[in-house]
Every structure is written in structure tokens, then in C-alpha cells.
């Protein structure tokens, strides 16, 4: 993404480790208290069982990458596939996966780069941010599936929008995906009003982005207030979930609504 890159060591406007710990504990509580059979409407075809297996697998994978200081995809190719645990063992397996990830991130030297799928090795702080965002969205998925109201905290969600644009926008696009055909202004309506629980009050929580172009190569964007062909506005939680194809709450679309829908549809990820 070039000009859109954020240095891995740039300070985040929230305590990533604290949010990763809290969200993981809440996620495990949900699957332990409610069982595995609830459908996860935001992940079509999945139950909480599938979501737990997915998130535990993600935690397990990145925990190993960081703990073993993996820098080459060749090492990953030697890893054996993890067998899926049976229901009686699933909660304990998910908890163990989180513990190993958490420990690996806590122990990781900041100057030890690791493999990532971005095309370059990066600081463990990149993994820390990625896992915080992954866990926050899937905590929302699990909470939503059992009817527990939950909003991702403002600073975390706003940073999630930035991370989405930097690393995910355009990924998974179908070969026949319609070009966006316009510029997009994303605007969080709550980032200037408050900061998230766990955020440093001195932090600046960014809340506006201007996306000049979106293609299979990624997004070209700047962090500024600038008029686009369409503006998409809403609380940071709702806007982040909208980008990830979820319905966290209504977002306001001002301008060319077809550009907004093509923009949202272009990235085919859940």
C-alpha cells in the first residue's frame, strides 16, 4: 500500500495486550456458557463450534510464529496440520492456544522480526495488533450470536479500520469484481468525542480516511477529511463491522450509494 503503510512500531491509541487478554477471556466465557451449537449469523454456515476452532487455530498459529521466531515460509511448510479437538476438549484447547499466543507476544523481543503474509518480515507488534483486531471482531461475532450486546471500543475499532485499509482492502477480490469507480471518505462519528477503555487519554484516535483507489493490489488512502464521491459515516464499531461484511449498526451513506456498495463488495473476506 505504499504511502498508506503504518510503521509496526508506531504506538497504538490503546493497550493491545490488555484488549487481547480481555476479549479472549470473554470469548471463551461465551462458548463455555452457551455451548457450541448457536449459529453465527455474521459468519454464514458457521456455529460457535466452528468459530472457536477458527480463532483457536489463528491464535495457535501466530503464537508459534512468534515463539519460534519464524522468518521463512519454508518453515511453515514443515508444520503438521493440527487435528481438530473433540467438543469436550475444545474449550480447553482454545484457552491453551490463547495462553501460548499471549505468552509469546509478552516474551517477544521488539527487534526480532517474524514472518507475515504481507510480503515482508515484521515486528511482533504487527502480530499483536493483528491478533487484537482478529479477536475483537470474533468476540463481537460470538456475542452477537448469543444476543449479548457488545461494541468494540472506539480506539480499537478506529484502528481496525486503519488496519483493514492498510492490509486487507482489496484482498480476496473476485476476478470479475466490479471496479469501485469512485473515491470514498470513511468517517467515524465518535472518535473525536471519547477514547476507548484502556486508551491513553493523550492518544490521538484517528477517525477519517480518504480512499483514492481500491484494486486487487490494495487501497491507496490518506488519513484526512476530504470529500469523496461517497461518504460512509458511523460509530467506529459500526463502520469497522460494515467493512468486514457485518451488521453492527446502521451506517450513513452520503453521495453515490452504488460506489459504497461496490467498495464494500470488492474485498471478499470474513
Image (tube, helix red, strand yellow):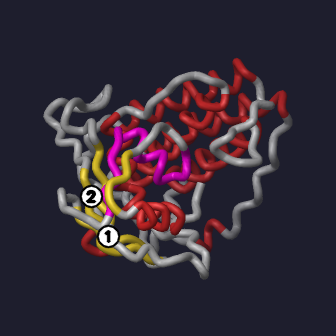
Answer above or below: position of 120 versus 15. Answer: below
- Between circles 2 and 1, the one closer to the viewer is 1
267 part of magenta stretch: no
Q: Residue at x 25, y 32 (%)?
A: 195
Q: Residue at x 61, y 74 (%)?
A: 74
Answer above or below: position of 159 versus 136. Answer: below
Q: Which quarter of the rendering shows the N terminus?
A: bottom left
Marks 2 and 1 close (CB-CB < 8 Å): no
Q: Is residue 18 left or right of residue 195?
A: right
Residue 175 position, x and y percent, is: 60, 81
Residue 23 position, x and y percent, is: 50, 30
The front one of 81 and 225 is 225
Q: Residue at x 59, y 45 (%)?
A: 59
The front one of 85 and 198 is 198
Residue 255: in sight, yes or no? yes
Residue bearing the label numbered 1: 183
Residue 113: in sight, yes or no? no
Label at residue 209: 2
Q: Earlier in the sequence, mark 2 or mark 1?
A: 1
Give the class, few, some or many, for how many residues have Cα within 10 Å of label 1's Cα (few <14, many ≥20): many
Residue 269 falls in image quadrant: bottom right
Q: Magenta part of the protein: which range?
A: 230-246
Label at residue 158: none
Give the class, few, some or many, for how many residues have Cα within 10 Å of label 2's Cα (few <14, many ≥20): many
Q: Residue at x 38, y 61 (%)?
A: 165
Answer above or below: position of 32 versus 217. Answer: above
- Disc 1 is placed on an element classified as loop
Farthest residue toward the left? 202
Residue 105 falls in image quadrant: top left
Amino acid at each position: 500500500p505504499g504511502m498508506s503503510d503504518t510503521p509496526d512500531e508506531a504506538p497504538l491509541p490503546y493497550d493491545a495486550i490488555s484488549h487481547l487478554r480481555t476479549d479472549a477471556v470473554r470469548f471463551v466465557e461465551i462458548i463455555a456458557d452457551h455451548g457450541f451449537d448457536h449459529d453465527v449469523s455474521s459468519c454464514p454456515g458457521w456455529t460457535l463450534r466452528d468459530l472457536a476452532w477458527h480463532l483457536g487455530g489463528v491464535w495457535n498459529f501466530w503464537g508459534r510464529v512468534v515463539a519460534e521466531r519464524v522468518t521463512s515460509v519454508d518453515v511453515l511448510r514443515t508444520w503438521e496440520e493440527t487435528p481438530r479437538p473433540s467438543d469436550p476438549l475444545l474449550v480447553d484447547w482454545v484457552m491453551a492456544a490463547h495462553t501460548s499466543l499471549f505468552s509469546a507476544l509478552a516474551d517477544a523481543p521488539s527487534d526480532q522480526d517474524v514472518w507475515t503474509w504481507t510480503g515482508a518480515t515484521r515486528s511482533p507488534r504487527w502480530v499483536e495488533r493483528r491478533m487484537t483486531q482478529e479477536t475483537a471482531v470474533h468476540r463481537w461475532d460470538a456475542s452477537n450470536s448469543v444476543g449479548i450486546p457488545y461494541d468494540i471500543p472506539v480506539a480499537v475499532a478506529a484502528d481496525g479500520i486503519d488496519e483493514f485499509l492498510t492490509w486487507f482492502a482489496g484482498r480476496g477480490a473476485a476476478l470479475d469484481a466490479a471496479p469501485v469507480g469512485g473515491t470514498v471518505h470513511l468517517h467515524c462519528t465518535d472518535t473525536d468525542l471519547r477514547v476507548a477503555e484502556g486508551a491513553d487519554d493523550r492518544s490521538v484516535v484517528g477517525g477519517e480516511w480518504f480512499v483514492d483507489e481500491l484494486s486487487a493490489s490494495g487501497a491507496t488512502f490518506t488519513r484526512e477529511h476530504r470529500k469523496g464521491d461517497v461518504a460512509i459515516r458511523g460509530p467506529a464499531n459500526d463502520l469497522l463491522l460494515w467493512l468486514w461484511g457485518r451488521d453492527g449498526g446502521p451506517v450513513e451513506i452520503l453521495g453515490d450509494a452504488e460506489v459504497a456498495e461496490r467498495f464494500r463488495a470488492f474485498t471478499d473476506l470474513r
